[in-house]
Image (tube, coloured by chain):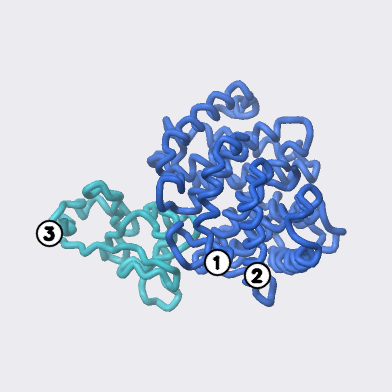
Chain colours: A cyan, B blue
Amino acid sequence: MIFLAKVSEIPEGERKLVKVNGVDVVVFRQDGRFHALNNACPHRQGPLSRGTVEAAADGSGCFVRCPMHGWKFDLATGDSHGRPANATVYALDRRGEELYIES
Amino acid sequence: MGDEDNMSIRMEQIQPIIDREYAYLMAEHARWSLTKGDQDLELVAHALRVLLHMETVPQHPDEYLALVECQHQDGGWGKMSSEKQSAAWVTAFCALMLIRGNLALKHPRITESVRKCVRYFLETQKEDGKWSDPSWADLDAVSHPISFFDVLMALSPTVPTLVDAATMAKVKDSWRKGMAFMLERQAADGGWYDPEFHPTGVEITAHLIQDSIVADMVLTDEFNVRNCCRKGVRKLLSVQAADGSWDDENVDHTMDCTRSIMLVCSILGTRAQCDPAIMRGLAWILKHKCEQGWPDFPGMETNLERTCDGLDTLLKYQAYSRPETAAIVKLWGYAE
């Protein structure tokens, strides 16, 4: 397991960018839950860490919208709402006040 | 850089940056050249545009011929050069680079490739005038083929053998339908929006005003194009941040807006109104470049595609600074 961040480093509604084995991973804290995604949008590699987080209209969760060309991804699953590729989501492990992902 | 400095960006400042960044792009040749293997074609097209505007195309015919090599039978290209499925956006970008590059190269295989591109767009246009691409908003997907047809029509007097008269008539009809699709979707505030892809409307508005302005040069004013473009520019000026950037410090979108306003205000004759915004945009772009190249956002690592955009922006600013409007129009391929 690789240490990502302390829970206290990511206030509700915020995100933190972490480099893991050379890959940029962005960790979002939204509605009390943490989500880790590859920071590069699969469209044109725009930084999801600069994206806006919005609630899905049907109340099914939240998505992040890439700031470059607007692709949006479900924070929990990475689903791209019908675009040709999804975002990569990493399984998070919370151990007390610390967050980890698998190496 | 203070406001007073923003207004005085001199050519002596710009040229050394262009020289250094071009040398950097050439040093990174293996990362973008099709002669080195499979590549992301949008990056390739960005790099070929730099060659065009640096006027170094004659030294690099292999780069353009390699693009012809990976064209599909239907006339299109995919996102990657190895990809078999054609897509409208990237096909239009490749087509633009070939038609413009061939002004210098005059190669029969490139001419034939451009003809295949024309057929691709004529055959894939939808009934309502748009082209579709799952990776892009409809307004994005329509703007690039329109831009290709803009150039095709602008160059037809220079290269009359490129397409026959019957094909050119079809192109004009297709272009008119695509142009109508675009212009009819402009919002009352002058912007173009797509709730899925472009809620702020900044990037798409920058693209569409530069595509639309050509209609003013070609058509009678049936679409009221000048007014559409004036409103589009006003919209962009109204959402520029005080620091000179657009869209929350988005380097790509700031470059898009700066370049597009330079072209459109040159043609509309509204440079005096737009100069301060252009200078602020340019100063911001220069301030946030990396040691080599440009990032997607300030503080990030260099991105090669953005570096091509940065070079293109500086080259267009050089052209904009010349007294004759044709100098900048030429860098969109709308004039030889």
Chain at tag 3? A
Q: Residues within 10 Å of mark 1 (few under 14, many from 20)?
A: few
Element carrying mark 1 = loop
For label 2, the residue is: B130
Q: Position of residue B100 (x, y in %)?
A: 66, 47
Q: Position of residue B157 (x, y in %)?
A: 81, 50
For label 1, the residue is: B73
Residue B287 versus residue B223 in the image, above or below:
above
Q: Dividing the picture into quarters, in which one does residue A91 lie?
A: bottom left
Element carrying mark 3 = loop
In whole angstroms, how far apart are the C-alphas of marks 3 and 2?
53 Å
Residue B83 visible from this viewpoint:
yes
Q: Say which residue appears at 61% left-offset and 50% top-offset.
A: B98
Chain at tag 1? B
Amino acid type assigned to the residue bearing label 3 in the image: Gly
Residue B243 visible from this viewpoint:
no
3 or 1: mark nearer the eye: 1
In whole angstroms, how far apart are the C-alphas of marks 3 and 1?
58 Å
Q: Dividing the picture into quarters, in which one does residue B128 lie?
A: bottom right
Amino acid type assigned to the residue bearing label 2 in the image: Lys
Q: Say which residue appears at 35% left-offset and 63% top-offset.
A: A87
Left or right: B153, with A67 as reference point: right
Q: Say which residue appears at 48% left-offset and 68% top-offset.
A: B85
Q: Residues within 10 Å of mark 3 (few under 14, many from 20)?
A: few
Q: Which quadrant: the C terminus of chain B? A: top right
Chain at tag 2? B
Q: Say which residue appears at 67% left-offset and 56% top-offset.
A: B148
Q: Position of residue A10 (x, y in %)?
A: 27, 53
3 or 2: mark nearer the eye: 2
For label 3, the residue is: A96
Residue B33 versus residue A66 in the image, above or below:
above
Left or right: A2, with B161 as reference point: left
